[in-house]
Structures are given as C-alpha cells and as structure tokens.
Image: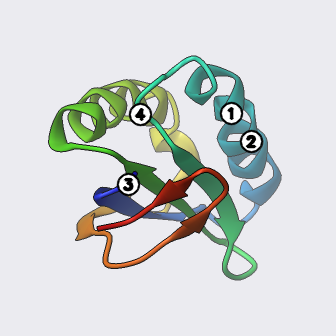
Amino acid sequence: MVNVGLFVRIEARPGHEKEVQAAITAALTDVEQEPGTTVWLALRLGPTTFAVVDAFPDQEARQEHLEAGRARLARLPELLAQPPTIEYTDILAAKIPGTTAG
C-alpha cells in the first residue's frame, strides 16, 4: 500500500543534461536498497527538465528516502540551474502490482 509520495523537479544547467540524466538514473541502484520506497520513477519532462516521482507506505519511509536523496543531490549543484523543487504528496489512488492506495 502506498499513501504518501514525493514529486521532485530537477532543472539541469544547459550543457549538463547528460550528466544530470546519468546521475539520476544511477540513483536507481541506491533506491533499490530502500525497502520503504515502493515506487520510484525517473522522468524527463523536457530538454533540461527532469523529475523523480516516489511513493511510500508511510511518512517514515518517505523521510528516510528524502534524506538519502538529498545526499545524492548534494553532489550535483554545479550541474543544476537551480536547487531541486521537492513537493510532498498524498497518494489518492494507485495501480501498482500487489498494492492498493487508500
């Protein structure tokens, strides 16, 4: 079951899109080790804009993931046009194999 999430928007500095994409996709290895991270999606929204969408069963799992993610993002400031925007979300409904929201 997933109840809470994060939506993180990441804006790459022009000319650094490939490095930002590589850093984001490399994070999957770390995220796979987080038992509380039920859903993790890395998205490209535009030429320099990326997003990560996460879902968790509870606030504790979300906070643990957020702290680990901030450490990963801290390595990227020279590649980013601005600091990442982090939005806390509530999951209203989800279709995930083996889980339901609510």
Nearest to viewer (mark 1 / mark 3): 3
Q: How much space separates mark 1 and mark 3, taking CA atoms? A: 19 Å
First of labels 3, 2 by sequence position: 3
> Residue 23 location, x and y as percent?
69, 37
Q: Secondary structure at mark 3?
A: loop
Q: Quadrant of residue 52?
A: bottom right
> Residue 73 location, x and y as percent?
45, 36
Q: Do residues under tags 1 and 2 come within 8 Å of each other at their CB atoms?
A: yes
Mark 1 — residue?
A: 28
First of labels 4, 3 by sequence position: 3
Q: How much space separates mark 3 and mark 2, taking CA atoms? A: 22 Å
Q: Secondary structure at mark 2?
A: helix
Between 100 and 66, the one lying in front of the other is: 100
> In the displayed structure, does residue 17 sit left or right of residue 84?
right
- Label 3: how many Cα within 10 Å (few below 14, some 14–19, many 20+): many
- As drawn, 26 above or below 58: above
Q: Quadrant of the C terminus?
A: bottom left
Q: Residue at x 46, y 37 (%)?
A: 37
> Residue 81 location, x and y as percent?
48, 63
Q: Residue at x 40, y 30 (%)?
A: 36
First of labels 1, 3 by sequence position: 3
> Residue 51 location, x and y as percent?
55, 65
Mark 4 — residue?
A: 69
Q: How much space separates mark 4 and mark 3, taking CA atoms? A: 19 Å
First of labels 1, 4 by sequence position: 1
Q: Secondary structure at mark 1?
A: helix
